Amino acid sequence: MNQMLLLSMPDAVSSFGLAMMNERRAEGQAPVHADEKHMGDFAKLSAEQVATICQRAATKSKTALSDKYGVSRATLYAAIKVA
C-alpha cells in the first residue's frame, strides 16, 4: 500500500502543475481571442500569389516556384492543396 502511495504522489503533483500551466496559458490567450486578433504566424503567401502558383504548378517545377516566392516546398504544397 505504501509503495502505491509513493508512486501516486509525484503523479498527482505533476498533474496539478500541468493543470496550472494550462490554466495560465488559457488566461493569457483569452484577451487575444476576445479581441479577435491573430495568433501564430501570418500567411506567407497572399491570395493572389496562391492563385498564380496554382496556375503555374501544372507546368513549372514546384522547387522553382518555391524558390521564386521564397517559401518552402511544404508551404507551396499546402497552398495548392487549400486552393
Image (spheres, grey):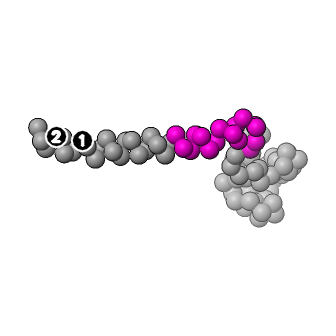
Give the residue number, with chain letter if any, for mark 1.
8
Q: CA distance from mark 1 to mark 2?
A: 6 Å
Instruction: Say which of 40 and 63 sits in front.
Output: 40
Vertical comparison of 8 with 41: above or below: above
Classified by dominant secondary structure, the portion drawn in magenta counts as helix
Question: What residue is drawn where x is 71% and y is 52%?
Answer: 41
The stretch of residues the image draws in magenta is: 23-38
Q: Where does the C terminus fall, quadrant-wise?
A: top right
State if disc 2 and disc 1 touch (CB < 8 Å): yes
Residue 73 occupies quadrant: bottom right
Q: Residue furthest left?
A: 1
Vertical comparison of 34 with 61: above or below: above
Q: Is residue 30 magenta?
A: yes
Type of the residue with mark 2: Met
Q: Is 15 positioned to the left or the right of 42 in the image?
A: left
Image location of residue 65, percent across then percent down: 78, 59
Q: Is residue 45 magenta?
A: no
Q: Is 10 positioned to the left or the right of 62 in the image?
A: left
Type of the residue with mark 1: Ser
Q: Secondary structure at mark 1?
A: helix
Q: Point out which mark residue 34 bears.
A: none
Image location of residue 44, percent across then percent down: 77, 54
Give the residue number, with chain letter if any, for mark 2.
4
